[in-house]
Image: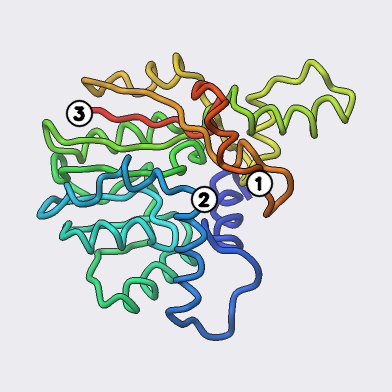
Amino acid sequence: MNLKEKIQSFWNKKPCGTFGDFPDKYDREYFENIRRRRYSLEPFIFQIANFNAAKGKKVLEIGCGIGNDGIEFAKAGAIYTGIDLSSKSVDLCKENFSFENLVGNITNVDGENLPFEDNVFDIIYSWGVIHHAPSMKNMIKEAYRVLKPEGKIIIMIYNRYSLVGLQLYILHGLLKLKPFVKWNKLFYNYHESIGTRALTDIEAKKMFCCFKDLEVFNVITPYDLRLSRNMFMPKIFSKLIPSCFGFFKILKGKK
């Protein structure tokens, strides 16, 4: 398999947000459990995404996963389109929407080759997805193309020099007697799907330089405070850590 096929295969086996084995039959409780876990770990999504401001606007989510954030956009009255390279994620997203009796245009599409005309969407939203693309530049270029003039982006990518990056360095650098390994290679080889990238603020600003009024900031997450797979330090500790070391890098801007 080439890199894109490997990435697609990874997320087909483990759609973002799911945990454990897939049930024989999906029900609303299955998706509710995932939703509760997501927003208990990442409650700041609501403030950053500002779903209610999307009412009546055309929203494209690049990498919709199983549709949790898409549902929030649709509930708020957005005209929602969700795409994902993972066909399994798209199937689950449609199921998720159906249990909520919501409407969305949800399709299995490669974000590097969007099947939309220029200047279509008011908002492009992508949470933890673009850094998985074989070519981030192509995906950003496509996002810019389909965004309306003055349209907004709300994007999260990974921050390289974060506490999660430090965890990777300890596990796959120091403990493997590779103290000089580059942190970008650690994300590429060991974090989620093969090829994952994590950027510095300078790299992010350069990569998204086509957008105006660009705002870049980092957020401390529970994953920075992880003790084991499902065990985290108390949230109070996040108040003691400078935000520059946060795992999530947020980008907001306009076309």
Category of crowding for the residue at label 2, using alpha-carbon neighbours closer than 10 angstroms: few (below 14), some (14–19), many (at least 20): some
Residue 8 in which image quadrant: bottom right
29 displayed left or right of 103? right
Q: Earlier in the sequence, mark 1 or mark 3?
A: 1
Instruction: Give the residue pinned by disc 1.
Output: 232
Residue 84 in which image quadrant: bottom left
Q: Earlier in the sequence, mark 2 or mark 3?
A: 2
Q: Amino acid at mark 2?
A: Leu
Q: Amino acid at mark 3?
A: Lys
Question: SS of the residue at dot 1?
Answer: strand
Q: Nearer the viewer, residue 33 or 175?
A: 33
Which label was assigned to residue 41?
2
Question: SS of the residue at dot 3?
Answer: strand
Residue 13 position (above or below residue 52): below
Category of crowding for the residue at label 3, using alpha-carbon neighbours closer than 10 angstroms: few (below 14), some (14–19), many (at least 20): many
Label 2 to label 1, Cα distance in Å? 10 Å
Category of crowding for the residue at label 1, using alpha-carbon neighbours closer than 10 angstroms: few (below 14), some (14–19), many (at least 20): some
Label 1 to label 3, Cα distance in Å? 35 Å
195 displayed left or right of 85? right
Residue 171 position (above or below residue 179): below
- The residue drawn where x is 26% and y is 36% is 153
Q: Check the image and name the residue furthest to the front.
A: 236
- The residue drawn where x is 26% and y is 50% is 60
Q: Are marks 2 and 1 in contact (CB under 8 Å)?
A: yes
Question: SS of the residue at dot 2?
Answer: helix
Q: Amino acid at mark 1?
A: Phe
- The residue drawn where x is 18% and y is 28% is 255
Front: mark 1 or 3: 1
Count of marks overlaid on the render:
3
Instruction: Give the residue pinned by disc 3.
Output: 254
